[in-house]
Image (cartoon, rainbow, N blue to C red):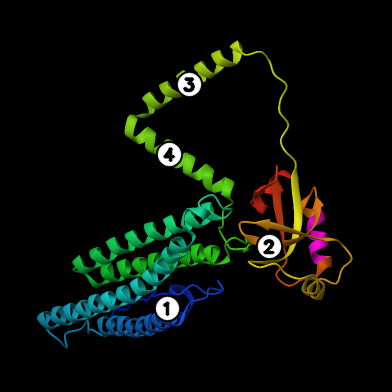
Amino acid sequence: MPHFFFLLIIPVAFSQIPPNLGLTFNAKESAKLDKAKESLEQAGQDIKKSVSAFNNIPQDTSVTKAEKIQMEEEALAQLKLASKAYQAANNEIYTTYKEAIDNFWNKIGKEGQTAIGIVRSRYYEDLAKRAHQEALAKRDLLQEASQFDLALRRLNAANQLEADANLYHGRALRIYQDFPVEYDYQWENDPTVNEILAMKKKEKEELNEKMFGKHKVEQTEQKQAKDTLTQEQEKVEATPVPQEPIEFRVQIAAHTIRLDEAYIKSIYKGDKQVEEIIEDDWYKYQIGSYTSFGEAEKVLVEADVERAFVVAYQAGNKINVRDAKEIAP
């Protein structure tokens, strides 16, 4: 009687190439991605064939033990070969996204280093790199496996990691392609800038503790706290500086060239005044100045302008909307 393994391979069209990100590519990039998708589909079929070959190995006495071992080795070799093809296709997607990201930085240079959204896109680039490196390790371990079931588990783990890497790269690229405009993409597990900074701080603290030991870190923290307390005691009590208020606006259009009044009136039929500002070498057209996100969101709905969105400022500087909502919902 044959033994059966369930194949957990990720559906190619829906996972390895991230869906619903609205990315744009030139003809060369699109051709590379189309070819990679075809290669993934073929490799996926080859993986299924190897699993089928393994599952169909007779477990009764109709074949000798030596014949069974040979069949298992052939199925495992087929799985390993298909894994290499699957990895090569995934690498094509990964490098295509990475090259597009690198092209963005070549064009923007240092100008975008402090732009809104860059913290988030850099975060996704880092996640993509980590997932890609973990996938490479899983693929290497797969090639060393001598048992089919172990190799298949490692293959599925590598497939998932590569899918994650492509998703993270895709999110980073989407942010870059929209630069300098920032959108609330409504992605799952999409942390705010403040949450990312908090995670980075925690990672740094954990690394310090690992490198120097918990006791030394605690001693350093205690000394810093004592020094801070001493400094505070030596200061004359000062009046607390109030936090700068948050200002929300509704942005209805943006372009690298000035838009004429007739065009603005053609997309916005309301009676509220539209202000033109220049920000990051872009002409931006915005409505109002509101102290809460809820108030601005109401105006956004009433404006009924396609791809309009709410932006936030503090002390004249643009900030992440989700961070602003935490302060002024």
How far apart, in angstroms, are the residues tagged by discs 1 and 2? Answer: 30 Å
CA–CA distance in space, label 3 to label 2: 47 Å
Secondary structure beneath label 4: helix
Q: Which residues are magenta?
A: 295-301
Number of the label disc, if any, that sits on residue 283: 2
- Which is more foreground, mark 3 or mark 2? 2
Q: Which secondary structure, mark 3?
A: helix
* Tag 1 residue: 29
- Give the mark, 1 or 3, whose residue is nearer the N terminus: 1
Whole-Å distance between the Cαs marked 4 and 3? 17 Å
Residue 263 left/right relative to 229: right
Give the mark nearer the N terminus: 4 vs 3: 4
Q: Amino acid at mark 4?
A: Lys
Q: CA distance from mark 4 to mark 1?
A: 37 Å
CA–CA distance between discs 2 and 4?
39 Å
Mark 4, other Cα within 10 Å: few <14 / some 14–19 / many ≥20: few
